[in-house]
Image (spheres, coloured by chain):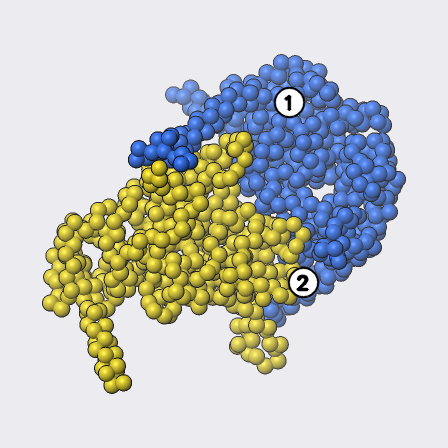
Chain colours: A blue, B yellow
């Protein structure tokens, strides 16, 4: 009897503890706490419960034998446009009423491909068509789940700003040659649009403040009209929404930092920021993060004065720097992008990997959940067959919240199954087509001839 | 002159005599939809209504009697979402909404109206009410001269829930019957819903240019409508000392609509629009639903299923091989109705711009081949439509007191060539006319043998 009760208690304890997975025989790149040559990670309820050379493996735990391969935290891309059915609401210069969360597309194959490149979290941004763009969404690449399940719970909402050639529509057909004019047409105008928008937002904020005070005093009052364009800007003013600003040139970077200072808000990250190395001190002083490319530039005039040392120089000046993709293809090998900072700027391996893990996590204020292999963080993990900074490294397995979302072996074996299904469907359609086209009533192949 | 007058009087008298006070169909198989089939029964119609139905109904002495031996009587079919009755309108492009093209044609009177509404040169945002004609009603647009009414009536359709379909807030739908000499006689009830599309202009034209812009606009409209109502109510209570609220026809139109239609064809859209509808706090009907087979058990809203099943693109690049996803959709879409039925979701069919009734029936047949029972299919073409739009107290089944809309066939309705004998709309008897609709290019009809020209 007693043993039954004990068994029951043990069973209940096991149940309460939830599913347990252990990754063993792995070289663990924790990013923040050094590297363990041959270690184990215990995952419970989707969280990292223990990390070390030896962990306490409970009976019944699912074992993943890494076979001497490398485990690193899931890669975080601070600038992406995948998994969305819309990128730009470019019709207006301020389109803060729109948001990625409305249009997340969990069926975008780019999600799976990013996952196969080790990416587990992405900051999905509105495009750069306008000075103040739409709201962003931080997602996890939970392939196979619905749109709502993609959203990174607990992430801070963001908004996209853009400076320079894109919002001023450089390269667009000019008015008079069939193009539609849209203010602004210059960098001065871009600044003005942002200033006007926040001036409007402050008035709006004041009208709600006045209303709330009236209500508190017990006076009767009609609420102001809610304005979906201005609400996110008020959130920016109140520090509840992060600004991720697309920018290239040093002068426009300084302009934006000054505008933000004037209105009393912060720029959370400068995106692209190819001339960031020229104004790293000012960026550091403002407290902005920088999310840049490793060595991608020269694709337009404002992107000429760039150097591959940008990420390293900003890092050495104390700026939190991440490397992003802005591109579904580049997104699949961010580990190689990180590796370039070893050559250009002589960063350490940990510093390099931090640029695609803990640094973007800090920039997005999700570093308490992800970005390194530490007890208490989500079990978002990537297993590479070689060191991830090697060009030969391939992703073998990806876990998000302890669940496996990508396995190279499974991917390979599923390809034949899918190919077979496709062939069956094509054959079926062809057969239907032939049946419909089949001649009737004795009209054979010779039924129609020129007379 | 006097002779002419006399002749007129005689013909008028004949016309009155032509319309019998009552009609009885006897010895017919009756499929009421609302209840079990009556293998041999009587339906009595009087004054445009069903006076009696049953196996043991006595035939009134003043009734014209139709021998129903070998005939089956069904309720008139109802198109759940169309623009039938609105002449010259562009073909409805409900499922084309996601393709992002503008679908207005110059011949479309509503398009012209929208063009004039959009005459304000700059759209600065939601406040300029882009692509909105929420205040117009189908009831004000319908016209008995629309020749499609006769074409569809001949195939057994007696009723449609018809909508203006141009723009984002296109306007209010009305239930119309396919009979009557004046527009007003056609209208059963109006408005029943607001037609909302997620149509985008694309690119950098006028707001909203992208899907999230459309959603933000729709969201702002309902916030504005709420606020507008509050301000108006406050003003109505005590106008003294209060600034007069500005009249906003776009919001008036939205507030007048008891339901909204939201487009949702793909699984992603179904999930998205269910969430969006809940956020808007409106009574929502989803339309499209081709990928409903993927997630039937998650659907909590009534659904209108488009009968325009996805097909391989005609005139496409012959060397291009479709994606597995596209192939799966084409294969599985017709199984969506059966999946919805199994999950207990309220659903009905709509023609989605198919212009040949024969093609509509072929499409229904496809759904039946994919697992829907003929009974479920019939319901989705009759009573379920009426229930979804809240008119099941007067339409959708053969019951005493309902509107006398019937279709009488020889043999079954769901055969390749259903033999419609008569159609009754508001108690008026019609005989089918041969289908003269131009056949779809490359459609099923075009592949018929053209005859032995040797």
Q: Which residue is mark 2?
A: B122
Q: Is residue B109 visible?
A: yes
Q: Say above or below: B440 vs B178.
A: above
Give the quadrant of residue A103: top right
- Most extreme residue toward the front, as rendered? A451
Please name the residue shown 57% across and 79% down the image: B239
**Label 2: element kind:** loop
Question: Between marks 1 and 2, how big is the CA–CA gap?
Answer: 51 Å
* Residue A243, visible in the rendered structure: no
Classify 10 Å Cα crowding around label 2: few (below 14), some (14-19), many (20 and above). Answer: few
Q: Quadrant of residue A176?
A: bottom right
Give the residue at x 36% y 33%: A447
Q: Is residue A119 above or below residue B367?
A: above
Mark 1, other Cα within 10 Å: few <14 / some 14–19 / many ≥20: many
Tell me the tag on residue A301.
none
B57 sits to left or right of A424: left
The structure residue drawn at horizontal position 60% and vertical position 63%, both measured from the top left corner, is B118
Residue at 13% x, 54% y is: B27
The N terminus of chain A is located in which quarter?
A: top left
**Contact check, label 1 and label 2, Cβ < 8 Å:** no
- The chain containing the residue under callout 1 comes to A
**The C terminus of chain A lies in quadrant:** top left
């Amino acid at each position: 009897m007693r043993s039954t009760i004990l068994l029951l208690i043990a069973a209940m304890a096991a149940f309460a503890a939830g599913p347990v997975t252990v990754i063993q025989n792995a070289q663990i790149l924790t990013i923040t706490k050094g590297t363990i040559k041959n270690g184990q990670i215990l995952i419970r309820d989707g969280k990292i419960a223990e990390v070390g050379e030896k962990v306490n493996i409970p009976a019944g735990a699912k074992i993943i034998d890494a076979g001497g391969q490398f485990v690193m935290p899931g890669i975080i891309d601070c600038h992406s446009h995948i998994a969305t059915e819309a990128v730009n609401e470019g019709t207006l210069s301020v389109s803060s009423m729109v948001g990625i969360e409305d249009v997340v597309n969990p069926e975008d194959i780019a999600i799976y491909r990013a996952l196969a490149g080790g990416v587990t979290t992405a900051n999905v941004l509105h495009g750069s068509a306008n000075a103040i763009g739409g709201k962003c969404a931080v997602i996890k690449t939970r392939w196979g789940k619905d749109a709502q399940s993609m959203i990174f719970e607990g992430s801070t909402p963001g908004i996209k700003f853009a400076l320079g050639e894109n919002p001023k529509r450089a390269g667009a057909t000019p008015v008079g040659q069939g193009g539609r004019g849209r203010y602004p047409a210059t960098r001065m105008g871009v600044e003005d649009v942002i200033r006007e928008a926040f001036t409007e937002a402050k008035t709006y904020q004041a009208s709600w403040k006045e209303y709330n005070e009236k209500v508190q005093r017990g006076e009767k009052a009609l609420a102001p009209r809610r304005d979906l364009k201005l609400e996110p800007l008020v959130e920016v003013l109140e520090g509840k929404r992060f600004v991720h600003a697309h920018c290239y040139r040093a002068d426009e970077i300084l302009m934006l930092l000054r505008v933000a200072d004037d209105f009393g808000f912060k720029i959370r990250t400068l995106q692209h920021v190819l001339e960031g190395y020229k104004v790293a001190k000012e960026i550091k002083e403002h407290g902005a993060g920088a999310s840049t490319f490793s060595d991608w530039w020269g694709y337009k005039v404002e992107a000429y004065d760039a150097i591959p040392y940008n990420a390293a120089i900003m890092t050495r000046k104390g700026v939190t720097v991440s490397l992003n993709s802005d591109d579904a293809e580049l997104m699949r090998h961010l580990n190689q992008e990180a590796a370039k900072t070893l050559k250009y700027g002589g960063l350490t391996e940990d510093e390099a990997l931090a640029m695609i893990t803990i640094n973007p996590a800090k920039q997005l204020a999700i570093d308490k959940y992800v970005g390194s292999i530490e007890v208490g963080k989500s079990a978002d993990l990537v297993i590479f067959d070689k060191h991830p900074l090697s060009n030969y490294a391939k992703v073998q397995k990806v876990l998000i919240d302890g669940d496996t979302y990508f396995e190279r072996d499974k991917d390979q074996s599923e390809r034949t199954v899918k190919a077979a299904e496709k062939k069956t469907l094509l054959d079926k359609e062809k057969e239907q087509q032939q049946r419909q086209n089949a001649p009737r009533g004795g009209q054979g192949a010779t039924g129609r001839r020129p007379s | 002159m006097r002779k002419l007058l006399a002749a007129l009087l005689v013909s008028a008298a004949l016309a009155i005599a032509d319309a019998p006070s009552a009609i009885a169909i006897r010895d017919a198989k009756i499929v009421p939809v609302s209840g079990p089939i009556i293998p041999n029964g009587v339906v009595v119609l009087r004054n445009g209504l069903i006076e009696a139905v049953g196996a043991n109904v006595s035939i009134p002495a003043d009734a014209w009697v139709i021998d129903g031996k070998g005939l089956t009587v069904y309720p008139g079919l109802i198109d759940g979402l169309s623009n039938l009755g609105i002449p010259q309108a562009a073909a409805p492009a409900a499922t084309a909404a996601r393709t992002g093209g503008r679908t207005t044609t110059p011949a479309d009177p509503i398009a012209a109206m929208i063009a004039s509404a959009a005459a304000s040169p700059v759209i600065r945002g939601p406040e300029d009410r882009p692509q909105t004609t929420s205040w117009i009603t189908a009831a004000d647009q319908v016209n008995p001269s629309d020749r499609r009414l006769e074409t569809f009536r001949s195939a057994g359709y007696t009723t449609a829930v018809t909508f203006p379909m141009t723009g984002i807030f296109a306007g209010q739908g009305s239930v119309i019957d396919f009979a009557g000499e004046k527009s007003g006689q056609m209208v059963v009830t109006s408005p029943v819903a607001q037609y909302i599309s997620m149509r985008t202009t694309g690119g950098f034209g006028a707001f909203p240019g992208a899907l999230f812009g459309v959603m933000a606009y729709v969201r702002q409209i309902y916030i504005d409508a709420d606020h507008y109502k509050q301000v108006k109510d406050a003003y109505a209570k005590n106008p003294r000392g209060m600034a007069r609220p500005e009249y906003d026809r776009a919001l008036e139109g939205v507030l007048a609509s008891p339901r909204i239609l939201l487009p949702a064809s793909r699984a992603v859209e179904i999930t998205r629009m269910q969430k969006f509808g809940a956020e808007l706090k409106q009574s929502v009907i989803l339309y499209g639903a081709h990928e409903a087979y993927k997630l039937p058990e998650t659907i909590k809203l009534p659904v209108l299923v488009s009968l325009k099943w996805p097909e391989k693109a005609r005139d496409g690049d012959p060397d291009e091989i479709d994606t597995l996803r596209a192939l799966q959709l084409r294969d599985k879409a017709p199984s969506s109705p059966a999946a919805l039925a199994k999950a207990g979701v309220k659903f009905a069919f709509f023609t989605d711009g198919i212009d040949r009734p024969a093609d509509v029936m072929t499409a229904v047949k496809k759904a039946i081949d994919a697992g829907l029972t003929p009974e479920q299919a019939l319901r989705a073409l009759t009573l379920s439509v009426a229930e979804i739009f809240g008119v099941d107290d007067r339409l959708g089944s053969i019951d005493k007191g309902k509107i006398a809309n019937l279709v009488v066939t020889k043999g079954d309705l769901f055969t390749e060539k259903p033999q419609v004998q008569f159609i009754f709309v508001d108690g008026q008897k019609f005989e089918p006319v041969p289908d003269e609709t131009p056949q779809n290019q490359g459609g099923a009809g075009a592949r018929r043998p053209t005859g032995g020209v040797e």
